[in-house]
Image (cartoon, rainbow, N blue to C red):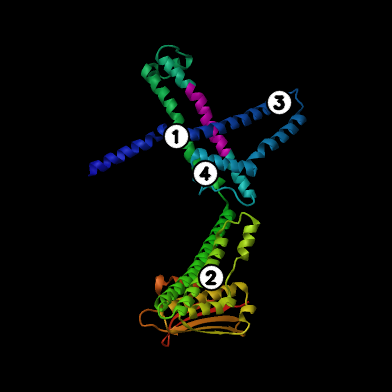
Amino acid sequence: MTRRTATGEGRRTLRWALSPLTSASTVRAGVYLVVGGVVAGAYALLAAGFVQMFADPATPRAAVAVLAAVTAVIVGAPPFLAPVRALEIAAARTFLDVDARELPDPSGPTTVATRWRGAAWFALHLALGAVITVGLLVAVPLATQLVLSAFGIDESFLVRMAPTFTRHAAGWVALAVLALLALPYGTALARRLLRQSAEPLLGPDQTARIAELEAQADRLAERGRLARELHDSVGHALTVTTLQAAAASRLVGSDPDGARRSLAAIEESGRAAMADLDHVLGLLRAPDRAGDVAEARRAPARSLADLPALVDDARHAGADVRLDVDDGVADALPRATSHEAYRVAQEALTNAVRHAPGRPVTVRVTVDGAARRLDVEVANPLHAAAAPGGGGGGRGLRGMAERVRLLRGDLDAGPDDGRWVVRARFLLP
């Protein structure tokens, strides 16, 4: 077993050592580096030209200095430009196989620090590209000369001045192979250095990362809110539909009118659920056009004004529900508070009807003016079989608690003097 492990480790080590010679990533990185070397060569030629002009006594120094300053601004500006940085990011992904999660697309305003980091990457790319390009231009002719000398075709001055061991054909061939092998391994080393530098130099800065984390948190919060909307509205509709279908099945022979009323209640619950579902789907739709946003905002959103209709649906399903609401509560509350309070009452009532069928349920909504607080309470006698809100792993209770906490309130749910009571308190502005 140990011998097999050692053999496997040896094979993996050999594959790793030979990977620069066989991997396509080395070729892609080599192309990227040669492009950088060509650009670096253009900069070097330009600098050499100005050095030569300055060295010529016949050239006016002031004119050359002005021309050099203007040229330096022109050729030095691109590394600081946002489009060049975006191009470098795309090239790093394509030629260096950098993950898009490490180098996301640029977004937001470009800061001074971001521009300088982009310029540093540009300089690193050109410097490493110059090294690899010079190595390519030296290694290939050198290896060619060594091979020719090994076969006695052309014994140049370089070979005649070589050390003693290279005066043998095998030594010349070995030097040629080493010169050629230096290129892929040097390219692999430069690729690794660039990949390690990509995120610090081309990645988003601290401000952009914080903004992205905030946006991600907002998206997660929105997904949670939409999940709660679907859970509460569709769950309530399914509970009412199930109870009404059972009632219709019992009454279809003895009380056809009662069965028809139950079927009508099923139809109404289905319509209400479809309206809520349309509202949630409208929020999920990507806002590609202004009309989509307006449509989502026009979609129906339930509030405490819809609480009487919710109680009527439960009564039609056979539940004994008493509603106690302070006058004018629905009109005086902020829209968000009214909506979340409605959803809490809906979920608590659904749990009561589901887990304690036939038991009287009390829904009370009051406003404490002195404490600037809205209280929503749903209570019913405890059922021996199960406690309301306990089904589904407590998902309903967690959803209600999340709704209340979003508005700086608190929620209590549990047994209280022989009843199951859900109390939600919302702070009012």
- The residue under label 2 is 272
Find the distance from the CA under tag 1 to the CA under tag 2. Answer: 59 Å
Quadrant the C terminus occupies: bottom right
Distance of mark 4 from mark 2, alpha carbons? 56 Å
Structural crowding at the residue carrying mark 3, measured as other residues with C-alpha within 10 Å and reported as few (<14), some (14–19) or many (≥20): some
Mark nearest the camera among 1 and 3 is 1
Pick the front one: 227 or 252: 252
Q: Amino acid at mark 4?
A: Ser
Calculate the distance from the C-alpha at mark 4 to the C-alpha at mark 3: 37 Å
Bounds of the magenta segment? 123-140
Rounded to the nearest whole Å, what is the CA distance between mark 2 and mark 3? 84 Å
Of badges 1 and 2, nearer the viewer stands 2
The residues tagged by marks 4 and 1 sit, at their Cα atoms, a distance apart of: 21 Å
The residue beneath circle 3 is: 53
**Which residue is pictured at 37% across the width and 79% down the height?**
386
Mark drawn on residue 113: none
Residue 180 in sight:
yes
- Which badge, 1 or 2, comes first in the chain's sequence? 1
Residue marked by disc 4: 197
Q: Amino acid at mark 3?
A: Met
Viewer-side label of 4, 2: 2
Q: Please say if 217 is above or below 321.
A: above
- Mark 1: amino acid: Ala
The residue depicted at 38 percent of the width and 23 percent of the height is: 174
